[in-house]
Image: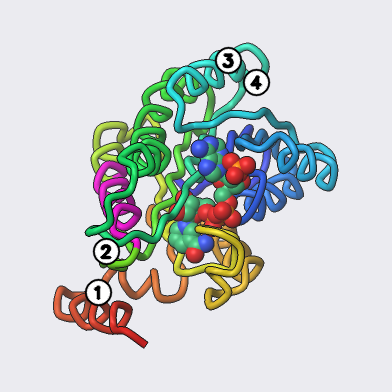
């Protein structure tokens, strides 16, 4: 069944900026209840102040107890929540030979992979109680071919793509599972200025929301749409291209 674009209650992790906020705005305009979360109180308050009607709560999804607390708060305050958008993510450039603190790697794994897997499990019982239960996982064009200077990030996105397929299979007929697959998009992912080469955020978000109304379960854009269906030979060529030194 296509996702109906109004009358839902969405929880969007990492909805205070970038892709999450762009989706939140569009869902809000279409008569949905939209709840966002993020780590920074200031960033969250700014988003809530600009987009009247948005609801929000500070939550670091990389932290287990904060995930549990988020789930409890949503059950109590927004029991009609039927759509979970696992969007929060971080991206770190790293040289694998450098001896950086292991905690930094663990944090990236926790936010990008452990959190969405745990949140699916925590929210599935609530989502299933409501009509049109849907989980939307935000992966990446890098789920299909890694960018070698963001090796852990690329690995988490490949793993989340895999998990999303299994989730869809196991919840067939109970929860719709949609994968949103962005290409490089102009946001602050990885730090300000690092994604200026990507597609404009509004162009990307408009296309994604339009595609969500279709029956497509994997919703991609631009180069990510190419990667999604590319052959192994094509992906080898993409690998060479994106990993060639300038
Ligand atoms: N932009 C791209 O080129 C691109 C391409 C492919 C996939 N994606 C994926 O799209 C998703 C959104 O990325 P974006 O580009 O919009 O990045 P962004 O502009 O950096 O925004 C990230 C959002 O997530 C929040 N966030 C980060 N860590 C969090 C945590 N531990 N707990 C809760 N919220 C957290 C941030 O707020 P706080 O910092 O306040 O927590 C912010 O609201 C990510 O999963 C990313 O991997 C992006």
Comparing 76 with 101, the one in front is 101
> Is the CB atom of the residue marked by disc 2 within 8 angstroms of ligand 1's nearest atom?
no
- Element at label 1: loop
Who comes first in sequence, dot 2 or dot 4? 4
Sequence order check: which comes first, mark 1 or mark 4?
4
> Can you tell which quarter of the image residue 10 is in?
top right
Residue at left offset 52%, top offset 21%: 66
Name the residue carrying label 4: 78
Which stretch did the figure color magenta?
Answer: 150-164
Relative vertical location of residue 144 with respect to residue 108 in this rendering, above or below: below
Q: Which residue bears the numbered disc 2? A: 144
What is the distance, in whole Å, between disc 3 and disc 2 at their CAs? 35 Å
The dominant secondary structure in magenta is helix
Q: Which residue is mark 1?
A: 230
Q: Are marks 4 and 3 in contact (CB under 8 Å)?
A: yes
Residue 156, given in percent of the width and then of the height, sits at 31, 49
Disc 3 under 8 Å from ligand 1? The reply is: no
The Cα atoms of the two marked residues, 2 and 4, are separated by: 35 Å
Q: Position of residue 55 (x, y in %)?
A: 73, 32
Picture disc at residue 75? 3
Cα separation, mark 4 vs mark 3, equals 6 Å
Q: Check if residue 162 falls in the magenta segment.
A: yes
Q: Position of residue 41 (x, y in %)?
A: 71, 34
């Amino acid at each position: 069944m296509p996702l109906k674009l109004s009358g839902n209650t969405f929880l969007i992790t990492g909805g205070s900026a970038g892709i999450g906020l762009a989706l939140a705005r569009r869902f809000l305009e279409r008569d949905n209840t939209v709840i966002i979360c993020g780590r920074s109180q200031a960033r969250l308050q700014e988003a809530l102040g600009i987009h009247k009607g948005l609801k929000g709560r500070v939550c670091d999804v990389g932290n287990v107890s904060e995930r549990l607390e988020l789930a409890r708060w949503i059950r109590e305050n927004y029991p009609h929540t039927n759509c979970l958008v696992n969007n929060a993510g971080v991206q770190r450039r790293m040289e694998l030979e450098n001896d950086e603190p292991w905690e930094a790697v663990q944090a990236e794994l926790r936010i990008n992979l452990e959190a969405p897997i745990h949140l699916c499990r925590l929210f599935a019982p609530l989502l299933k109680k409501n009509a049109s239960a849907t989980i939307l996982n935000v992966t990446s064009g890098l789920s299909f071919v890694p960018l070698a200077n963001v090796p852990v990030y690329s690995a988490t996105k490949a793993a989340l793509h895999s998990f999303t397929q299994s989730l869809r299979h196991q919840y067939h007929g109970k929860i719709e599972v949609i994968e949103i697959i962005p290409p490089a998009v102009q946001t602050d992912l990885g730090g300000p200025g690092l994604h200026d080469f990507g597609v404009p955020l509004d162009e990307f978000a408009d296309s994604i929301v339009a595609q969500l109304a279709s029956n497509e379960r994997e919703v991609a854009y631009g180069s990510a749409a190419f990667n999604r269906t590319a052959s192994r030979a094509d992906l080898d060529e993409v690998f060479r291209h994106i990993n060639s030194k300038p």
